[in-house]
């Protein structure tokens, strides 16, 4: 049995504008091309797991495609063009990535479709549900702003500017921002961060707590009355690696109390405590992914609150993913593992796509 997949985190524009990756190509075609051209991409970001043919084989109906750039202090190398030193520069980088998604969807409507609101999502999801399993359909893009420094003034008017252009989800942090603490840079919400949350709620944005420091995330759960998710974040208790990048039990309980969905990242360093880049990928398997999923299901008492946020091509490649994965086309193999763990077809449909669909379909627009 095949299940429709929604993947809640892929840095597509960042890779396209940094390395020239064209995700209409098959993943192996991109790998061969980058090797022949001597691209820095495989060295700094690993070999890609993504391509439109692989999306089709896996039945990936929707991707949460990010707007992302790093602060200048986190520039990775001379090849890294997606950096900023000021909020104005961040706005320029994010606006260029936004333009990339619009241009791609307009130029290649058979490949990509922007899903700017709940109504567009519902129509797209229904089309995938009703299509034959071998039908080739456009992949839908839900736009997610990762790190909110591009919002120069956290007013409802500026947040609405991004929403009107298709952004549905905002994560205030990557590392620390002027809005809150983030990965490796702890800290609470700032006054500007609280203004941002008020503006997001007024506009109707989905708040993504991924990368937010725990103090900021816990306060956000109390303050924010709109929908809340963690698009790509694994439970600390299973990772067993000290970092504020992961979700403590306290934060998980807060998310579950808000009926949130958490996307599990199948990145080896986020799955087991002792794997490091350069270690054999075979040391980690899809059973480790299942363990993270099961932890949240056991805490929640159901399978309604966990899904997938792969972060594929987001700073790692195939070399850093579980043994069974060569491309995203292999992601459905996770169903075999979860079935052995006692999960039924309804649970699997929820984990692969329906839980995210519930979030994205909510609302009149």
Image (cartoon, rainbow, N blue to C red):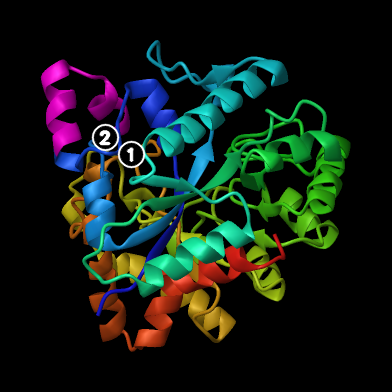
Left or right placement of residue 253 versus residue 76 in this view? right
Q: Is residue 44 within the magenta segment?
A: yes
Where in the figure is residue 80, as x and y percent of width and height? 43, 17
Residue nearest the observer in this picture, 39 or 108:
108
> Image quadrant of residue 11?
top left
Q: Indicate which disc, 1 or 2, sits on the residue closer to the N terminus.
A: 2
Q: Which residues are magenta?
A: 29-46
Question: Looking at the image, is 142 positioned above or below residue 147?
Answer: below
Residue nearest the observer in this picture, 146 or 56:
56
User: Total number of numbered labels?
Assistant: 2
How would you classify the magenta stretch by its main secondary structure? helix
Report the residue marked by disc 1. 316
Where in the figure is residue 152, as x and y percent of width and height? 77, 25
The residue sitting at 53% across, 22% down in the picture is 74
Circles 1 and 2, Cβ within 8 Å, touching? The answer is yes
Is residue 325 shown to the viewer in this render?
A: yes
Q: Which mark is residue 46?
A: 2
Left or right placement of residue 102 versus residue 178 in this view? left
**Mark 1, residues whose alpha carbon is within 10 Å: few (<14), some, or many (≥20)?**
many
Q: Which mark is residue 205?
A: none
The residue sitting at 74% across, 40% down in the picture is 187
Q: Is residue 169 within the magenta segment?
A: no
> Image quadrant of residue 248?
bottom right
Where in the figure is residue 197, as x and y percent of width and height? 81, 47
SS category of the residue bearing label 1:
loop
Question: Looking at the image, is 54 positioned above or below residue 178?
Answer: below
Cα distance between the residues tagged 1 and 2? 5 Å
């Amino acid at each position: 049995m095949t299940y429709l997949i929604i993947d809640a985190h892929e840095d597509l524009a960042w890779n396209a504008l940094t390395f020239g990756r064209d995700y209409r190509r098959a993943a192996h075609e991109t790998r061969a091309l980058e090797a022949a051209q001597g691209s820095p991409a495989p060295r700094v970001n690993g070999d890609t797991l993504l391509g439109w043919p692989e999306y089709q084989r896996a039945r990936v109906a929707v991707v949460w495609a990010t707007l992302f750039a790093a602060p200048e202090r986190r520039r990775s190398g001379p090849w890294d063009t997606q950096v900023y030193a000021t909020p104005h520069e961040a706005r320029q980088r994010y606006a260029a990535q936004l333009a990339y998604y619009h241009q791609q969807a307009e130029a290649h409507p058979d490949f990509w479709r922007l899903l700017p609101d709940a109504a567009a999502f519902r129509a797209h999801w229904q089309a995938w549900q009703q299509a034959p399993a071998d039908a080739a359909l456009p992949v839908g893009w839900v736009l997610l702003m990762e790190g909110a420094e591009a919002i120069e003034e956290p007013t409802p008017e500026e947040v609405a500017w991004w929403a009107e252009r298709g952004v549905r989800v905002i994560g205030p942090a990557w590392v620390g921002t002027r809005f809150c603490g983030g990965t490796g840079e702890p800290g609470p919400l700032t006054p500007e961060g609280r203004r941002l949350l008020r503006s997001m709620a007024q506009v109707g944005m989905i708040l993504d707590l991924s990368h937010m420091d725990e103090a900021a995330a816990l306060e956000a759960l109390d303050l924010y009355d709109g929908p809340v998710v963690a698009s790509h974040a694994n439970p600390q208790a299973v990772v067993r690696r000290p970092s504020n990048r992961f979700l403590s039990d306290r934060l998980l309980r807060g998310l579950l109390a808000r009926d949130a969905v958490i996307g599990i990242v199948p990145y080896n360093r986020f799955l087991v405590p002792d794997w490091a880049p350069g270690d054999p990928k075979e040391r980690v398997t899809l059973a480790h992914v299942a363990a993270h999923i099961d932890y949240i299901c056991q805490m929640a008492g159901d399978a309604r609150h966990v899904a997938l946020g792969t972060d594929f091509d987001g700073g790692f490649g195939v070399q850093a993913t579980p043994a069974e994965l060569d491309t995203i086309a292999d992601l459905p193999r996770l169903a075999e593992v979860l079935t052995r763990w006692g999960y039924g077809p309804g649970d699997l449909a929820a984990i692969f796509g329906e839980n995210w669909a519930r979030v994205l379909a909510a609302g009149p627009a």
